[in-house]
Image (tube, grey):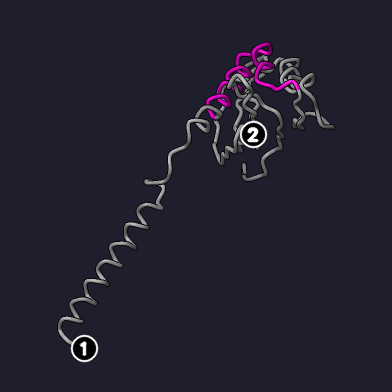
Amino acid sequence: MTREQDLIRGNNMKRLARLAIAAALLSSPLFAGQPSADEKKVWSMEDTYWRYVQANDLEHYRTLWHKDFLGWPLSNPEPARKAQITDWITLHTSKGESLKSYDLERLAAQVTDNLATVAYRVRLHWVNQKGAPVPGSLRVIHTWQRNAGGEWQIISGMAAPTNADGH
């Protein structure tokens, strides 16, 4: 191999190394793609959902749900419609419990046209009438549908308890 070929080969190897480093950096979480405006909006709506639960604001909570909702809340033995959507909250409040705080762990989001699905875990910090803690945690999946007015509403969803490790 000539000296010129060695130089060309060396330069090609350096270019390949730089490309590999750039690819690794761009695929790292630091450079991961930012959520879309729709994803941000739906995650914001999930936060609103939990603020309404915390405030026991059932009237505004119901506005988050599409009239044709079909889902399976954890507290229901059968699939539920919009008319039953506050049952799980009143189950807690009827026992004198209130939601003191919550922590959302956002796991996944996907927007396809006018549908957005989010999956997350939520750690709930309920308190009873005496102020004693009543902890809980759930896995939640909601599918939101954007209506003709551009507003998002929950069209379907399901909740399940977390496992012993909280996952």
Q: Residue 2's x, y, as percent? A: 17, 87
Q: Is residue 51 magenta?
A: yes
Which residue in the rendered view is the most extreme toward the right?
Answer: 78
Pinpoint residue 49: horizontal percent, then vertical percent: 61, 22
**Above or below — where is 136 with respect to 52?**
below
Residue under the image location 43 percent in, 43 percent down: 33
Residue at the spot 41% in from the left edge and 47% down from the top edge: 29
Q: Residue at x 64, y 30 (%)?
A: 144
**Quarter of the figure that contains the N terminus:** bottom left
Side of 21 where 41 appears, left or right: right
Q: Secondary structure at mark 1?
A: loop
Q: Quadrant of residue 7?
A: bottom left
> Hey, what amino acid is under mark 1?
Met
What number is the disc on residue 1? 1
SS state under label 2: strand
Q: Which residue is mark 2?
A: 137
Residue 47 lies, with reference to residue 60, above or below; the image says below
